[in-house]
Image (cartoon, rainbow, N blue to C red):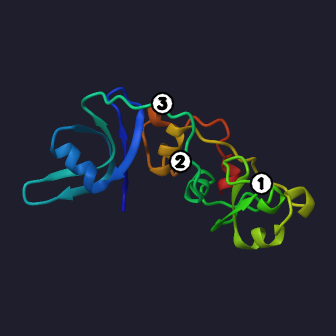
Amino acid sequence: MRQTLVLNASYEPLSTVSLRRAVVLVMQRKALVEHAHPGLRVRAAAVDMPVPQVIRLRRFVKVPFRQRAPWSRRGVLVRDRHRCAYCGRRATTIDHVVPRSQGGGDTWLNTVAACAEDNHRKANRTPAQAGMRMLAPPFEPTPADALLLAVGAQDGDALPDWLAVTGAGALPEAASA
């Protein structure tokens, strides 16, 4: 199911919602479509509108400040664009840089996306112990960047320039090819 980015009235990213919820917010005139998927439309008896990729609330919503993006396995895979941190091939698992058995935890800076072969080859060792080199170091995305990554902001979906991911540790293009 498609995810739609929800912006506050001040253009700050708030969350992602399902396509259905985004259409309801637009139809109830609680939100405006800021950016739509090119060529895709939602059609019904009395509705014909572009499929929203980014919507903006008409009224400002006060939200508590979130300092950190919550860690998740899916978030690590999305952050690393489903590319192995060791070889650059398609990643299906996550790897702990410092294994849990050696005191490493489930954090943004200790986990990277990995293909099953490299994850198995590294096993219960650090990359240095296994003689493996990472293509790019892990980084912690900001909460706003995590939302943009979740809706595919780095996948060339032609999002507007003003929605560019600002994370300093974004993967280099060579690592994602």
Residue 27 at x, y percent in the picture:
16, 45
* Left or right, residue 165 beside residue 28: right
Mark 2 → mark 1, Cα distance in angstroms: 28 Å
Of mark 2 and mark 1, the one earlier in the sequence is: 1
Q: What kind of residue is marked 1?
A: Gly
Q: Secondary structure at mark 1?
A: loop
Mark 3 → mark 2, Cα distance in angstroms: 25 Å
Which residue position is annotated with label 2?
154
* Left or right, residue 35 beside residue 92: left
* Left or right, residue 11 beside residue 98: left
Q: Quadrant of the N terminus?
A: bottom left
Residue 114 at x, y percent in the picture:
70, 63
Of mark 3 and mark 2, the one earlier in the sequence is: 3
Q: Residue at x 24, y 37 (%)?
A: 32
Are discs 2 and 1 less than 8 Å apart at CB?
Answer: no
Residue 167 found in image quarter: top right
Are discs 3 and 1 less than 8 Å apart at CB?
Answer: no
Residue in the foreground of this view, choosing between 27 and 164: 27
* Left or right, residue 163 beside residue 134: left
Which residue position is annotated with label 3?
65
Residue 142 found in image quarter: top right
Label 3 CA crowd tier, 10 Å (few <14, some 14–19, many 20+)? few
Q: Residue at x 86, y 63 (%)?
A: 125
Q: What kind of residue is marked 3?
A: Phe
Of mark 3 and mark 1, the one earlier in the sequence is: 3
Q: Quadrant of the C terminus?
A: bottom right
Q: Is residue 61 above or below residue 119?
A: above
Q: Secondary structure at mark 2?
A: loop
Residue in the foreground of this view, choosing between 167 and 60: 60
Label 3 vs label 2, nearer the camera: 3
The image's mark for residue 104 is 1
